[in-house]
């Protein structure tokens, strides 16, 4: 289904002299100018890029798209919000710095749900992004612009961020690969924070090999993010073919309960069968607290949001309401005019959960359930090497279908949030089209904490066998 | 069920201004979300230590030295202070917080 250039195509094309880095950048720029208005994947584009073209650089000349919540020095960064409409980044995010040093050319910044809050990109202050495969459907979210850009070949790869599924879910809806590394693997310095204990940056790509290459480039300890671990980065992209025979794969029985559409289940069962054919040992397992993960998530995330978004006060940067008579009015007016409905809803919910008298019942309770969920995963990983299942209950839904009911949008995240709560790595790879909707289905592979290597190996070999 | 008064009080604590229409909408939305979250009460968490973060890192220290990356000069100053909506020279202006007698 994926067309256009992969990272390997760019490497080969440059090495064989089929095109220069300038030419391939121009080709993509022109394509974006022509096609972006149909899907609104990009919010802003760059005309040229200062090139660091070391011949040894792993991503030399590769044109990529960046979700608009990562800072690129001297350029606009909106996070999909009116309150940051005119904000200019004062420095490079660590991930941007690493990609720049690896030779990546930045094409532009992609659309997203406001402050990454959403699962459809309909919460953007700058209009929804459309699914390139069917313009009446959402691309997923919150990294919907990044997923759409890759699916429409308006970039070789794109960067996204994942707090509860925001890389994997849009990747599933658009039929591309989306990879969320373990929490603490990739620096969040220069990423506009939503929920700091869950946010993680990762790539959206056309295949698993590209995801491995980008992951190796961006991973590692960063002195500007003290939650990153100082652990060696395994060389994964060269070992994707190493044997997965006899690998133990767990299938949680809770993943196949009510709410999962039959067309998604069919494809997931098909993927599991393929893994069995590849020699993996399939075992049914249990994650008993799976059904409570989403409820815990929707306490913890709004709580962290209410704290993180307190910085948008109309004083130091961003939108500020004119003519407010007092300092308090500056805060109140700037926030109510600058923020959209979903950030407000979550700020109020989070403030409620953290307020005196409710803290123990909500926030503390949720953190305890989170601990139990992590224990469930730890226990499961004593028996298996990886866990598999669906990414989303359904395929891409129609634009406007769910936007008026926040809870129904939250339920979209049911298979993706448990990983963020437990800090685990996970990937979504395409595993065919749904029988009824004819839209892509994503297959999720979940690994042990910091075992991206197994996740990517299983993903790669399943991807090859599904071709 | 969360009351109108509670919504108003929480919104003002969070420095979010809402009108009557928002109030009704938020009351309905938050009501259904909180109802869903009530599920957590089914879980026995007696004696469970909360998991605030997943890395296992404790006390990440670094030496108290300049990391050198951010050297203040006119250009960085302009990028930072220059973006304040209300400013004078190198200072950010805010409204008076003391009332005149």
Image (cartoon, coloured by chain):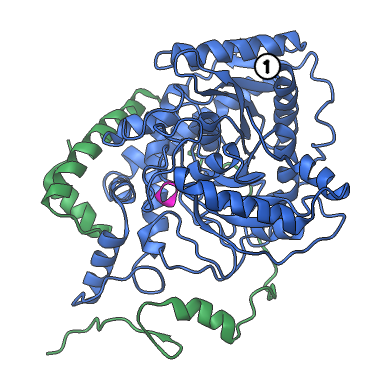
Chain colours: A blue, B green
* Circle 1 crowding by C-alpha within 10 Å: few under 14, some 14–19, many from 20: many
Residue A285 visible, this angle = no
Residue B56: image location, x then y, percent: 63, 44
Q: Position of residue B13 (x, y in %)?
A: 25, 58
Q: Quadrant of the C terminus of chain A?
A: top right
Compared across the picture, whether A144 is left or right of A7 comes to left
For mark 1, give the secondary structure. Answer: strand
In this view of the protein, can residue A189 be seen by the observer? yes
Question: How far from the left and from the top, in percent, is residue A433?
Answer: 54, 19
Foreground residue, A144 or B31? A144
Residue at x 73%, y 17% (from the top left corner): A465
Q: Residue at x 41, y 32 (%)?
A: A137
> Which SS does the magenta portion mostly show?
helix
For residue B3, side relative to residue A463 (left or right): left
Q: Is A13 drawn above or below residue A179 in the view shown?
A: below
Task: Assess whether residue A244 is covered by the magenta stretch.
Answer: no
Using the image, determine if residue A46 lies above or below residue B37: below
Query: Label 1 marks which chain's residue?
Result: A
Residues rendered magenta in the picture = A112-116
Q: Quadrant of the N terminus of chain A?
A: top right
Residue toward you, A104 or A386: A104
Picture residue at 31% right of the left edge, 35% below the top = A400
Front-lying residue, B74 or A104: A104
Most foreground residue, A465 or A92? A465
Q: Quadrant of residue A327?
A: bottom left
As drawn, is B32 to the left or to the right of A198? left
Residue wearing tag 1: A249
Q: Is residue A51 above or below residue A352?
A: below
């Amino acid at each position: 289904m994926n067309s256009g250039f992969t990272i390997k195509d760019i490497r080969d094309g440059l090495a064989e002299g089929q095109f220069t880095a300038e030419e391939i950048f121009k080709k993509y720029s022109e394509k974006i100018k022509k096609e972006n208005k149909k899907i609104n994947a990009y919010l802003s584009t760059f005309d040229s890029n200062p090139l660091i073209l070391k011949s040894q650089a792993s991503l030399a000349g590769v044109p990529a798209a960046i979700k608009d919540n990562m800072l690129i020095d001297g350029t606009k960064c909106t996070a999909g919000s009116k309150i940051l409409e005119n904000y200019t980044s004062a420095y490079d995010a660590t991930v941007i710095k690493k990609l720049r040093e690896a030779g990546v050319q930045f094409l532009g910044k992609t659309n997203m749900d406001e402050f990454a809050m959403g699962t459809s990109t309909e919460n953007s202050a700058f209009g929804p992004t459309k699914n390139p495969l069917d313009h009446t459907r959402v691309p997923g979210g919150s990294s919907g612009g990044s997923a759409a850009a890759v699916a429409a070949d308006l970039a070789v790869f794109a960067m996204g961020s994942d707090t509860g599924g925001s890389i994997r879910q849009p990747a599933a809806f658009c039929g591309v690969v989306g990879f969320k590394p373990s929490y603490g693997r990739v620096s969040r310095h220069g990423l506009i924070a939503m929920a700091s204990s869950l946010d993680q940056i990762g790539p959206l790509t056309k295949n698993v090999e590209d995801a491995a290459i980008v992951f190796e480039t961006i991973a590692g300890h960063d002195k500007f993010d003290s939650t990153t671990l100082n652990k060696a980065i395994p060389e994964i992209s060269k070992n994707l073919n190493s044997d997965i025979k006899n690998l133990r794969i767990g299938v949680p029985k809770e993943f196949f309960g009510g709410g999962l559409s039959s067309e998604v289940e069919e494809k997931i069962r098909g993927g599991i069968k393929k893994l069995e054919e590849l020699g993996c040992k399939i075992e049914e397992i249990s994650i008993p607290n799976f059904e409570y993960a989403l409820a815990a998530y929707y306490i913890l995330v709004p709580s962290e949001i209410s704290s993180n978004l307190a910085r948008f006060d109309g004083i130091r940067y961003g939108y500020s309401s004119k003519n407010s008579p007092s300092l308090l009015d500056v805060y109140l007016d700037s926030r109510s005019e600058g923020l959209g409905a979903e950030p407000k809803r979550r700020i109020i919910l989070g403030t409620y959960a953290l307020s005196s008298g409710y803290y123990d019942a909500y926030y503390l309770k949720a953190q305890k359930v989170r601990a139990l969920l992590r224990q469930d995963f730890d226990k499961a990983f004593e028996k298996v090497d990886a866990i598999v299942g669906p990414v989303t209950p359904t395929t891409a839904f129609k634009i406007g279908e769910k936007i008026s009911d926040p809870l129904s949008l939250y339920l979209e995240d049911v298979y993706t949030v448990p990983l963020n709560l437990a800090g685990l790595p996970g990937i979504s790879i395409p595993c065919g089209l749904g029988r009824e909707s004819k839209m892509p289905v994503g297959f999720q592979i979940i690994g042990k904490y910091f075992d991206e290597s197994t996740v990517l190996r299983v993903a790669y070999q399943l991807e090859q066998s599904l071709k | 069920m969360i009351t109108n008064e509670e919504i108003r009080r929480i919104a003002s604590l969070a420095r979010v201004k809402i009108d009557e229409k928002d109030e009704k909408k938020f009351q309905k939305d938050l009501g259904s979300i909180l109802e869903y979250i009530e599920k957590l009460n089914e879980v026995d968490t007696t004696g469970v230590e909360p998991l605030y973060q997943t890395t296992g890192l404790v006390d990440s220290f670094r030496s108290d030295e300049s990391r050198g990356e951010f050297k203040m000069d006119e250009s960085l100053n302009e990028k930072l202070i220059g973006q304040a909506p209300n400013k004078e020279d190198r200072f950010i202006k805010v409204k008076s917080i003391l009332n005149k007698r």
